[in-house]
Amino acid sequence: MVIRALLIVCAAAVAAVWYAALPPRAAVASPADEAATVRGAIHVHTTRSDGTGSVDEVAAAAARAGLDFVVLTDHGDGTREPLRPQYRSGVLCIDAVEISTHGGHIVAIGLPKTQYLLGGEARDVLEDIARLGGMAIAAHPGSVKPGLQWVDWDVPVDGIEWLNADSEWRDESPWTLVRALLTYPVRPTESVAGLLDRPAGVLQRWDEALRTRNVVAVAAADAHARLGFRSLGEPYDNGASLHLPAYERVFRAFSNVLPEVVLSGDAAEDAALVIGAIRAGHLYSRIDAIGPAGTLDFRAVSGDVTASTGDLLSDHGRGAIAVELASAPQARIVLLKDGQEIASSGEPRLEYATETSAGVYRVEVSVPGGPGRPPVPWIVSNPIYVGRDVQPRTPPLPRPVSASESQYSNGDADRWTIETSPGSRAAIDVGKTTDGTNLALRYALGGSTSESAYAGFVMSSGPTLSRFDRVTLTANADRPMRLSVQLRVPEGQQGERWQRSVYLDDVPREITVYFDDTRAVGPTRTERPPLDAVDSILFVVDTLNTPLGGSGRIWIDDVKYAR
Ligand SMILES: [Zn+2]
Ligand SMILES: [Zn+2]
């Protein structure tokens, strides 16, 4: 009898704690508000990679969550043909890809099927994405999981995930995670939102990048609907898993709002509009689960010119910034300039005179009772660039040449040798050109995946390399590809190597590799190559960018050292 009473008391106590742990119920958007704004999820995995839902299931979940579009980003190397834009369950499905690089994962939007594998150093993958007309977004930059963190902050990404739902759960205490799992069955969306914080470090990195160039920020669902059992919740675990949190719950938790887009119903046309708006930064993110549905109107005006989120306002004399919120009681608007708070308002309207104050302005809006420490903002806008020219993505200027020394222009390939993995083949032929000869390098990558297939064309570097700072050559190939130019120091079994990957296609081009612009391949004792110890220059085709079974030809000529 006593035991039964005790059990009842215990059960009641547990229930009370559980009830107290429930996150507050999310406000429900009015249909009128929802109809007026185009919203969507960016960064979603399906069964084509490590997600648990098919494209149709993801689209249906997005439809239930009231979204208009989803950007699918299954892991890949760019060589999968993207799905045509399509409306499924009334939701515009835009296919994109998440590419792994040495610097972290990149979400590439608007990229066509590529002719070789994208991968390797982040700077090379970004160069490829830009050449192919895509947009590159640094994925989960703030992840506490080392393999997922973005580490290459020097490369000019077009965008950044200021929020990533997969990063957000990783920094929570076990208690918070257990609480989220226990409250999920009753308040699933709120439980997902309850794991969000304001990612101060990522926002600071974004503000720093904005000082020199335009960078778009998006909120990334990174939805897999998978929690691995073996790996304590890893979505990347391909063993048994819980299909949590459901896609719909992540889609209801937050979204990206495109205030200027009006959809026509034509999938191809609408996809172009949505991608164009994302690229231009004509978007803000909203944590739908924590605030009442409301819209942000953020603009800067100078004379008769008006700029809105993502835009440039080049003339800032006598300018003013206006921020207006529709249907958002109790919200606090904070206006930031170059990362610093410069004005705030508890009213649904804020005005600020920019006068002669050039800078990058952006808005964060918070609502009371938001989850997280520090609390996640309800709205994060993209910036308005006041009084600053758009910084085009330009390659670094070529350095002047004061001296050069030819290493190959005509004649035999007697300084050249070949190195390949066991199952691969390579050959060097001397070919005739109008003014002499060039070298034709043939390769065929074969063998098993474990062999890390490669074909290397090796030029002994000669005694003078250390007097120069670069190697130049003219090169083309029978197809678009990447070639790794490497400096090798004979050390140990494999040698120590530093490389710079270059792009080749059928147009002969002069290529310059600066020795101080090479990066170590694997562990090396020095960060930069010790030039007086280098004994060979390698031109390597390998499975980083060329598929196993791939074969082709490269022509090179006029190899020179210069300084
Ligand atoms: Zn990723
Ligand atoms: Zn992902």
Image: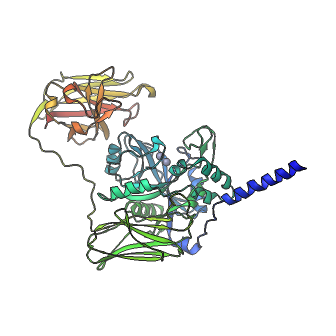
The reply to whether residue 437 is visible in this rendering is: no
Residue 321: x and y, percent?
A: 36, 74
Q: Is residue 502 left or right of residue 183?
A: left
Q: Can residue 125 be seen in the rendering of this structure?
A: yes
Residue farthest along the left direction in this orientation:
402
Horizontally, residue 212 falls left or right of residue 463, namely: right
- Closest to the observer, 511 or 254: 254
Q: Tell me how the rendering is colored.
A: rainbow
Where does the image place residue 528, in percent across and percent down from the top left? 26, 34
Q: Residue at x 28, y 79 (%)?
A: 303
Q: Nearer the viewer, residue 6 or 424?
A: 6
**Image quadrant containing the C terminus:** top left
- In this view, the residue farthest toward the bottom is 304
Where is residue 440 shown, x and y percent of the image? Answer: 23, 30
The residue furthest right is 1
Location of residue 484 by image quarter: top left
331 is higher (above) or lower (below) than 482 = below
- How many numbered badges does the structure rendering display? 0
Q: Is residue 222 left or right of residue 246?
A: left
Q: Position of residue 9 (x, y in %)?
A: 81, 54
Nearer to me, 425 or 53? 53
Q: Residue at x 35, y 52 (%)?
A: 157
**Residue closest to the eye, 219 or 36:** 219
Does 353 appear above or below 432? Answer: below
Is residue 32 found left or right of 126 in the rendered image? Answer: right
Above-or-below relation of 525 to 87: above
